[in-house]
Image (tube, helix red, strand yellow):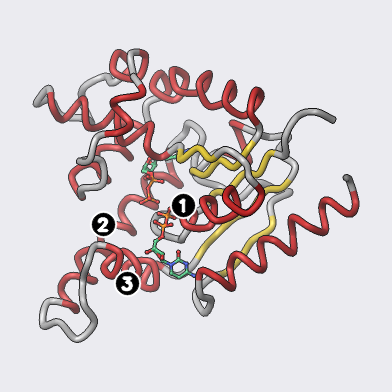
Amino acid sequence: NSRRMLIAIDGPAAAGKGTLARTIAHALKLPYLDTGLLYRAVARKVLDKGVDPQLHSAEEQARHLKEDDLKRHDLRTSEVDIAASLVAAQPLVRQALMGFQQKFAQERGGVLDGRDIGTMICPNADVKLYITASAQTRARRRWLQNGGQLGDPQEKAGILHLLREIEERDSYDRNRTNSPLRKADDAQTIETDDLTPEQVFQKAMAIITSHLQQDP
Ligand code: CDP
Ligand code: CDP
């Protein structure tokens, strides 16, 4: 079996998918693809044009996405969070980005993280993980990730703002017709509310190792 191992990681916003995916890829020396970045880059290009991402078709931007578009430093703003979710609901955008993701997975194997990796992009992945936590926990994580300090007078309002945004985006991602966020039937869920990134990694590695023992 010359193909490298394929690991699919899905889950809602700020659950820790990227952190886990990067750590697994590093540990197993596998390539890593953050598929959220593709939708963010498309959203960024739509916003740059000054048009409404909900009303404007983003297919053109998705078709002509370049490596350099993924390297921009302004892909993780809250404006892009929301716009990414809006363009990601467009069937033609998903279709335009599917080929790149499947080619990456087929040629290189590796770790992919997103919303529909286990269900649509890599239904035959060797291991599928569904990473989740309460919306409150995830809002708190994103607040800290963005440089927020615990005990800051802005903490409560800042976390509440992120909580609303995360809940709105999750609901949009879960309820869209095309490739909604959903746990694949054969994915293993890791509830991470009470776990550190290191503990999540250990649980994931236990799942991956047991898969390797069954099916080397
Ligand atoms: O990729 P996704 O949006 O799902 O999340 P992330 O950017 O990997 O992680 C969000 C933040 O949560 C990062 O700052 C992590 O250090 C932190 N975190 C985590 O990933 N896992 C935990 N169990 C606890 C915190
Ligand atoms: O890091 P975070 O979890 O906040 O978001 P992300 O993974 O960068 O994804 C941004 C948005 O892109 C999500 O809210 C989804 O609407 C969309 N997305 C998707 O539809 N399918 C994927 N495989 C990855 C992201």
User: Is the residue at mark 1 in contact range of ligand 1, meaning its CB lies under 8 Å from it?
Assistant: yes
Q: For label 2, count other residues whose C-alpha is less than 10 Å away and answer few (under 14), some (14-19) or many (20+).
A: some
Q: Name the residue rendered at 32%, 58% in the picture.
A: 166
Say whether residue 108 is left or right of residue 166.
right
Q: Name the residue rendered at 30%, 25% in the picture.
A: 68
Q: In this view, does 214 lie above or below 151?
A: above
Circle 1 is placed at which residue position? 18
Q: Which amino acid is tagged 1?
A: Gly
Label 1 vs 2, first from the N-terminus:
1
Q: Name the residue rendered at 66%, 33% in the picture.
A: 109
Disc 1 versus disc 3: distance between alpha carbons? Answer: 16 Å
Q: For label 1, count other residues whose C-alpha is less than 10 Å away and answer few (under 14), some (14-19) or many (20+).
A: many
Q: Which amino acid is tagged 3?
A: Arg
Residue nearer the viewer, 66 or 195 = 66
**Front position among marks 2 and 3:** 3
Please state the horizontal and vertical placement of residue 199, each as a whole percent of the image.
59, 73
On residue 140, the disc is 3
Q: Residue 85 sits in which quadrant?
A: top left
Label 1 vs 3, first from the N-terminus:
1
Say whether residue 13 is left or right of residue 54.
right
Q: For label 3, count other residues whose C-alpha is less than 10 Å away and answer few (under 14), some (14-19) or many (20+).
A: many
Residue nearer the viewer, 28 or 156 = 28
On residue 165, the disc is 2
- Report ligand 2 position as a quadrant: top left
